[in-house]
Image (tube, helix red, strand yellow):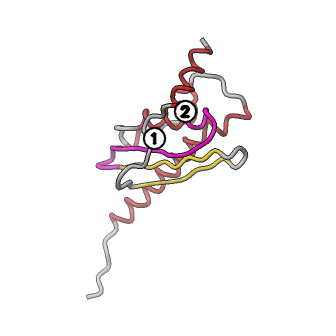
Amino acid sequence: MDDLYRDYILEHYRRPHNFGVIEDPTASFEGSNPLCGDRITLQLAVRDGVVERVGFTGRGCAISQASASLLTDEIKGKPVADVTAFRADDLLDLLGIDISPARLKCAMLSHETLQKALAESEEGAQTAAQPQESNA
């Protein structure tokens, strides 16, 4: 059974879903793991409270890149409230394998980056909703 999950992770690493830059993102955040050099830039396009499009770019180990691929599959098309409620344990469940303590930061990089991108998206929405002062 472990071989099946390893193959699943390697498949997402070799052919990641949602890999690439999206047009007109409402939020973008680059996360990195300085311990091993993994990097992920996650972009979100949120419209009417739904993650309409998502993309990521980056480089790193199979776990970090597969994790990002799985995460983006999971959040695309979902309401922001559901995406915000997505927990780190949910991502570990998607990965489906035991992650050693040394590799946990690799697996969680996409989740941490998502949280920062959501915060950026929220800040952008609040700024856009504020009335503009006029100098009349």
Question: Which quadrant would the C terminus be assigned to in this image?
Answer: bottom left
**Image quarter for residue 7?**
top right
3D distance between C-alphas at marks 2 and 1:
11 Å
In the picture shown, does residue 28 fall above or below 53? below
Considering the numbered disc 1 on the image, is that residue within a helix, a strand or a loop?
loop
**For the residues bearing labels 2 and 1, Cβ distance under 8 angstroms:** no
Q: Residues within 10 Å of mark 1 (few under 14, many from 20)?
A: some
Magenta segment boundaries in residue numbering: 46-66
User: Residue 97, image x and y in percent?
Assistant: 62, 22
Q: Position of residue 13 (x, y in %)?
A: 54, 32
Chain-order first, disc 2 or disc 1: 1
Q: Secondary structure at mark 2?
A: helix
**Which residue is identified by label 2?**
66
In the image, is residue 54 part of the stretch drawn in magenta?
Answer: yes
Q: Residues within 10 Å of mark 2 (few under 14, many from 20)?
A: many
> Residue extending furthest bottom?
136
- Residue at the image position 66 percent from the left and 23 percent from the top: 98
Percent of width and height locating residue 61 = 63, 36
The disc labelled 1 sits on which kind of residue?
Phe
Left or right for 60, reference 94:
right
**If the image is split into quadrants, where does the N terminus sit?**
top right
Residue on which the image places disc 1: 19
How many marks the image carries: the answer is 2
| Residue drawn where x is 71% and y is 44% of the image | 36
* Image quadrant where residue 106 sits: top right
Asked whether, in this view, residue 123 is left or right of residue 65, the answer is left
Whether residue 4 is situated above or below residue 116 in the rendered picture:
above
Residue lying furthest front: 14
Q: Does residue 57 belong to the magenta stretch?
A: yes
Q: Position of residue 17 (x, y in %)?
A: 44, 34
Q: Residue furthest top?
A: 1
